[in-house]
């Protein structure tokens, strides 16, 4: 993932951090997968696995942060190496937040199960949003591992799709709640789940933006996709 440096030890340190980031990404991807299973099947065991994984994700974030601070202090990197370390710091923060959103989904699913209202809800309509969010996260990790700007751009473009799914689902939920007041409480749980999926898409987009920052040195946060593509030409 990184170019050769004058310091072989520096290379080794960067490779170790990269490996830790991908391991953390794997844990978060597992959380996401289990959270979606919990949502689609109202599976309490899958929800529990998501919650049990959270401490490991948080620990990994702290460990990687510590390594980054240590490397910067010892090596005082510049140019592309410094961009890489800054991007890694941003990336692990976003990965940790994806884990938080997966935990939020798991807890909401547990609430629905405990309330005994699973069969009356329309969670199946969240399948598209869940699939989009999962795919965005998977592709973001792939783009980061390969430093692939093309994949990063695809992810940024997909963010509008998951936003549209969220807006559409929210309108449907309001209709359901107006038609049957008994669905208000569990429907609010589903609304929080839908928002969590939308936020996961946002964090995957942020990861994609980190890839562009590493490769091209461009900070494209809060930049329209047309402007990003123009800058990369």
Image: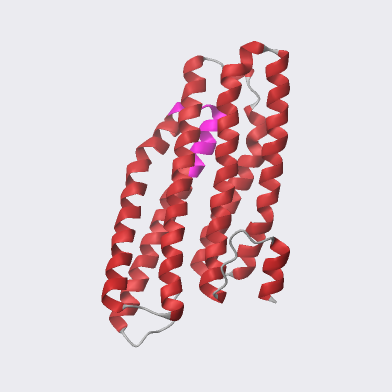
Estimate the x, y position of residue 66 in percent, counting from the top left. 28, 61
Q: Quadrant of the C terminus?
A: bottom right
Nearer to me, 195 or 28: 195
Residue at 27% from the left image edge and 68% from the top image edge: 70
Res 127 quadrant in image: top right
Q: Nearer the viewer, residue 143 or 169?
A: 169
Q: Is 162 inside the magenta-drawn segment?
A: no
- Residue 35: say if magenta: yes
* Residue nearest the viewer, comparing 62 with 223: 223
Would residue 43 be visible to someone looking at this image?
no
Viewed as shown, does residue 59 lie left or right of 102? left
Q: Is residue 187 above or below residue 8?
A: above
Relative height, residue 17 to residue 168 (above, below): below
Q: Going by the image, does 75 lie left or right of 226?
A: left
Q: Specify how the rendered protein is coloured.
A: secondary structure
- Write the start and end of the magenta stretch as one range: 32-44
Apparent side of residue 74 relative to residue 82 in the rendered image (left or right): left
- Tell me which residue sits at (62%, 11%) in the image: 182
Figure check: 98 above or below 212: above
The quadrant where residue 220 appears: bottom right
Furthest-bottom residue in this view: 6
Q: Main secondary structure of the magenta part?
A: helix
Residue 63: percent from the left, percent from the top? Answer: 29, 57
Q: Residue 154, how many percent across, how many down?
A: 66, 61
Q: Residue at x 57, y 58 (%)?
A: 139
Q: Is residue 175 visible?
A: yes
């Amino acid at each position: 993932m990184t170019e050769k440096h004058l310091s072989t030890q520096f290379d080794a340190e960067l490779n170790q951090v990269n490996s830790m980031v991908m391991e953390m990404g794997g844990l978060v991807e597992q959380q996401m997968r289990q959270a979606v299973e919990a949502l689609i099947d109202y599976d309490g065991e899958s929800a529990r696995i998501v919650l049990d994984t959270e401490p490991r994700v948080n620990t990994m974030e702290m460990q990687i942060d510590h390594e980054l601070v240590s490397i910067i202090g010892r090596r005082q990197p510049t140019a592309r190496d410094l961009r890489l370390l800054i991007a890694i710091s941003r990336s692990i923060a976003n990965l940790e937040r994806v884990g938080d959103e997966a935990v939020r989904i798991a807890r909401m699913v547990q609430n629905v199960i405990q309330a005994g209202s699973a069969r009356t809800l329309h969670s199946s309509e969240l399948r598209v949003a869940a699939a989009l969010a999962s795919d965005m996260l998977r592709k973001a990790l792939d783009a980061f591992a390969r430093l692939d700007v093309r994949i990063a751009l695809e992810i940024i473009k997909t963010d509008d799709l998951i936003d549209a799914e969220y807006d559409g689902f929210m309108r449907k939920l309001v209709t359901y709640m107006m038609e049957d007041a008994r669905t208000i409480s569990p429907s609010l749980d589903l609304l929080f789940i839908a928002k969590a999926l939308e936020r996961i898409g946002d964090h995957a987009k942020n990861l994609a933006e980190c890839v562009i920052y590493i490769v091209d040195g461009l900070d494209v946060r809060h930049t329209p996709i047309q402007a990003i593509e123009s800058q990369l030409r």
